[in-house]
Amino acid sequence: MKNVKTLVIALIMGTLLLANDSFAAKGLEEKDGDIVDVAVSTKFLSVLVDAVKAGDLVGTLKGEGPFTVFAPTNEAFAALPEGTLEALLMPKNKDKLVEILTYHVVAGKVLSSDLSDGMKAKTVEGSDITVHISDAGVKINEANVSAADIMASNGVVHVIDRVIIPPME
């Protein structure tokens, strides 16, 4: 049974590496700079960059870290219910925006090789996220990881296909 689990994890890591190769072809290879610099230089993370600016989190994510960021793509933000993103970017909703954005950040550097099925990690927001590993790939809560281990000077970025929302109290 242990050999089967090891094989499944090896296959998943291989899939993540192949995903990274396909993203490298799109210009998402290892980038110079901190997490914000990586996001700014990645065209399909431009909405995340706008949200980080609106939440006044640029200084934090340019900090020493290390940080692990699960970065939703522009398509992930576009999939939110109509008007949600626009409402979150309004100054009066800054606290909610910061809550959502910090739910995408884990203190420390967590690489794909550090992940295990069912693993929980406390986010900067304060709630846990859960890692799901299967033959289909790796998920953070319900978001698929589409590229992993994009290194930055102050941490690592993993690209996800959904905006993850902290649990309601």
Image (cartoon, rainbow, N blue to C red):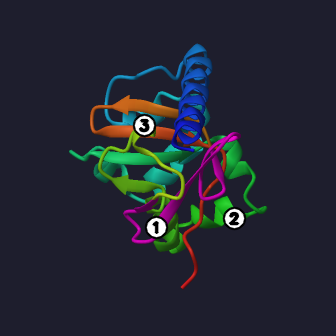
Q: Position of residue 98 (x, y in %)?
A: 45, 65
Q: Nearer the viewer, mark 2 or mark 1?
A: 1
Q: Which residue lies under the disc numbered 1?
A: 128
Determine whether the residue tagged by mark 3 lies in a helix, strand or loop: helix
Q: Which residue lies under the disc numbered 3?
A: 113
Queried whether the magenta region covers residue 60, the answer comes back as no
Q: Who's the residue at 32% across and 44% down the image? A: 109
Q: Position of residue 101 (x, y in %)?
A: 48, 59
| Amino acid under disc 3 | Ser
**Quadrant assignment for the C terminus:** bottom right
Mark 3 to mark 1 CA distance (whole Å): 19 Å
Q: Does 144 sit left or right of 149 as displayed? A: right
Dominant secondary structure (helix, strand or loop) of the stretch shown in magenta: strand
Label 3 neighbour load within 10 Å: few <14, some 14-19, many 20+: few
User: Which tag, 2 or 1, sits closer to the chain's start?
Assistant: 2
Residue furthest to the top in view is 25
Judge by depth and name the residue closer to the eye, 5 or 100.
Answer: 5
Q: Which residue lies under the disc numbered 2?
A: 84
Q: Which residues are magenta?
A: 120-144
| Amino acid under disc 2 | Thr
**Quadrant assignment for the N terminus:** top right
| Amino acid under disc 1 | Asp
Q: Who's the residue at 60% across and 36% down the image? A: 8
Mark 3 to mark 2 CA distance (whole Å): 34 Å
